[in-house]
Image (spheres, rainbow, N blue to C red):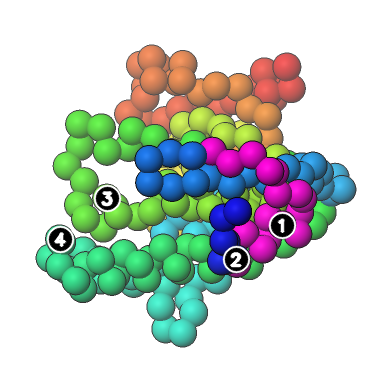
Amino acid sequence: IIPIKQTKHSKKLASKGLLLKSVLLSENCANLRYEYDPIISQGSKTVGADSGISSVLTLSDGQTTAADIHGHSLNSILQKISRKKKGSKSFHKALTQRDNFIRWSVNQLNLNDIKQINLEKVSNFRYKKHVNKFLNYSGEALIRSKLIDFAEDCGVRIVLQNSAYRSQRCSRCGYVCGSNRKAKLFRCKSCSFSADADFNASLNHEQNLPSANWIRYCSDLKKKFKQFEHAVIAG
């Protein structure tokens, strides 16, 4: 008989299913296990999602997390982190504030009508680069893990996609150009389509696009990128 003090998390698991009688014992703790049937969303929509600094998450159905709450935004919190001395109490306090802001932001999303979220897979953007503290502590890994956990509770499937060139691609005509995006504004050089840059990127993640890795071998990579052919996209 092991006395257990229930926590918010254990009560949540107990409401979903049954506490198993078997206990996994390790040197310093005992792991309790719960068995329950996975939740499956009854939604029908597949949406794309783009993470950022101005807005934590932007979905292709028009949802976006609050950019500012009580005078704080992810941008302002990251600015605060970059000013703090690494390892200090104020530095860790700012990191905790960032984590709480990200978790709060993701919890505001409504996933009732959604069955799948195509999320950008951000990786290796620090590779062989000098990244300042502002970007180094942007929290992209926490945004991804929090959304995955939140979607699991709602029965929504998460699919990670390669994010190469999707922020530069026009979601309307498919034209890819580096100068299409300037900060938060996206304006297509081909069809003049204009939208929020994060929203345009989320629309591209919603689509089942072919891998864009071959673009890096184009001779005009530093100038303008060729347009994705609609026939290729459809195939």
Q: For this rendering, which residue is in front, 7 or 50?
A: 7
Q: For this rendering, which residue is in front, 134 or 85?
A: 85
* Circle 2: element type: loop
Foreground mark, 3 or 1, reads: 1
Q: Amino acid at mark 1?
A: Ala
* Circle 3: element type: helix
Q: Earlier in the sequence, mark 3 or mark 4?
A: 4
- Image coordinates of residue 115 in percent, x first then y, are 78, 44
| Placement of 234 over or under 159, stated as above or below | above
Quadrant location of residue 206?
top right
Tag 2–tag 1 contact (CB < 8 Å): yes
* Circle 4: element type: loop
Q: Amino acid at mark 4?
A: Lys
Distance between mark 3 and mark 1 Cα atoms: 38 Å
Q: Which residue was labeled with disc 1?
A: 14
Distance between mark 3 and mark 4 Cα atoms: 12 Å
In the image, the segment drawn in magenta is 8-24
Q: Earlier in the sequence, mark 3 or mark 1?
A: 1
Of all residues shown, which one is farthest toward the bottom? Answer: 70
- Image coordinates of residue 218 in percent, x first then y, are 40, 16
Q: Which residue was labeled with disc 3?
A: 136
Q: Which mark is residue 86?
A: 4
Q: Earlier in the sequence, mark 1 or mark 4?
A: 1
Number of numbered discs visible in the structure rendering: 4
Mark 4, other Cα within 10 Å: few <14 / some 14–19 / many ≥20:
few
